[in-house]
Amino acid sequence: MNKENVSLFQQAVNSIKLLFTPKRYRQTKLVSRFKIALDALDKNSREYTLAAGVVELCEEALRITRQRILNNEKIRIATDKMEEVACFQALTEDETKALQHLLNHYISLSKERTALMHQITGFDASLSRVMEMEEDAESTVSTLAEAEEYRRVLKQDLGYLGGEKTELEYERERLERHSEFIRRFSIFMVSIFAVCTIVFSFMFIFNDAQVFRPFAIMAVCLMLVVFIIYIFKRRLNYELAYNLKKQQKAVEMLNKKTAVFAHYSNYLDYVYRKYRVRNSAMLRKNLKDVKTYKHLTGRIDSIRNIMYQTQDMIEDFLRKKNINHLSTSVEHFAKTINVLDKKAYYNELSDEKERYEHILTKLDDRHGEIWDILMEARDEDPSKERVIDSIIDIYLEEAERIVIPS
């Protein structure tokens, strides 16, 4: 190879290197084995210049090899992922809509079932007891409400009768105090008239005084006082007797109503314990909840049956279209899979694979260009030691080490 050819070859190498080599590799130093081969040459010789160009091309070829391996791995990964979702891509538009409709329907049923199960857990714990005796509770609830109302009225009556009895006792004490006062007043008046009689008697016997008129007046006053005391005494006795009758009647009514109140209280306590409720309103609410509970459980059973049917339809569809979901349940599959997203994902993977393949094609083309230049340089190697062959051998060994790592 003459000087002119070497110069043209070097310019071609440099131009191609600047065109295809990334910027971060343009200042890369020679690897150790290439450097050893170059150090054996005279830096001012034509062989060194040619060998240095070949080394740079070999280094670029090694970088291309690494990039090709990386792109091949990316293409493999993209291909594997495409194979996973290729079954969705193969679906027609009508099949896609049908499958997505089944999945959405299954998800909506699952959500409704979960919501209904949550409602069921909110019912009162006494509901199970009422469910066991629903018919008996239906006939008892109205009687229970009447018993509660009657007991409430009895409680008011007992309070009224108790207050009336207390008032009668206070009234009797007042009448007894009045009767005691009249008794003492009678004794006091009789004592006064007795003293007056004795005085008048002494005056008549010892002084021969005229006491007939005063004595007559005193007698009239005495009769008047006795009459008044008699009237008051009789009235008080009548009031006392009437008060006693009213007390007896009040006690009698109080005892009767107390017995009836105790009967209704025992009855209500028994019913409350029987149905595990606190009042008739709670029992009525529980009866209403029983109907709601039965409706909810019926709806849950209906949803479960529909879900089983939908699940069979989904599994049959997936089996016919060779869509594998064995790694997860149908419910999890329905919640995590969107057919349109899978098809869009397949298209993204396809575009990504094409991009990597295009890069790989460019790398292959560039590698072919480098290899042609290396072969040309080997054929025109002017050195006796065949330095270019040794450099190419080093490249092939390094390339083999990269492709087949130990």
Image (cartoon, grey):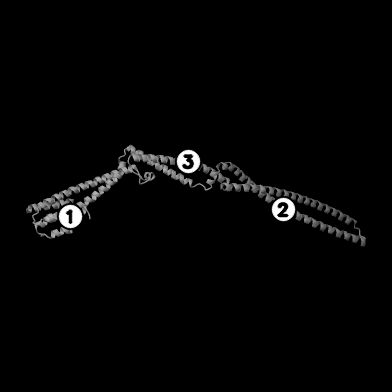
Q: Residue furthest front?
A: 406
Nearer to us of marks 1 and 2 is 1
For image coordinates 25% across by 49% down, the residue present is: 73
**Image location of residue 390, percent across then percent down:** 13, 56
Q: Residue at x 58, y 41 (%)?
A: 139
Decide if residue 285 is in sight here. Answer: no
In the rendered image, the residue lying farthest to the left is 2
Measured Cα–Cα span from mark 2 to mark 3: 65 Å
Q: Nearer the viewer, residue 252 or 389?
A: 389
Q: Are marks 1 and 3 in contact (CB under 8 Å)?
A: no
Q: Quadrant of the C terminus?
A: bottom left
Badge 1 is on which residue? 397
Residue that numbered label 2 is attached to: 169
Secondary-structure class at tag 2: helix
**What amino acid is found at the position of numbered circle 1 in the picture?**
Glu
Query: Mark 2 belongs to which amino acid?
Result: Glu
The earlier-in-sequence mark between 2 and 3 is 2
Q: Is residue 149 left or right of residue 2?
A: right
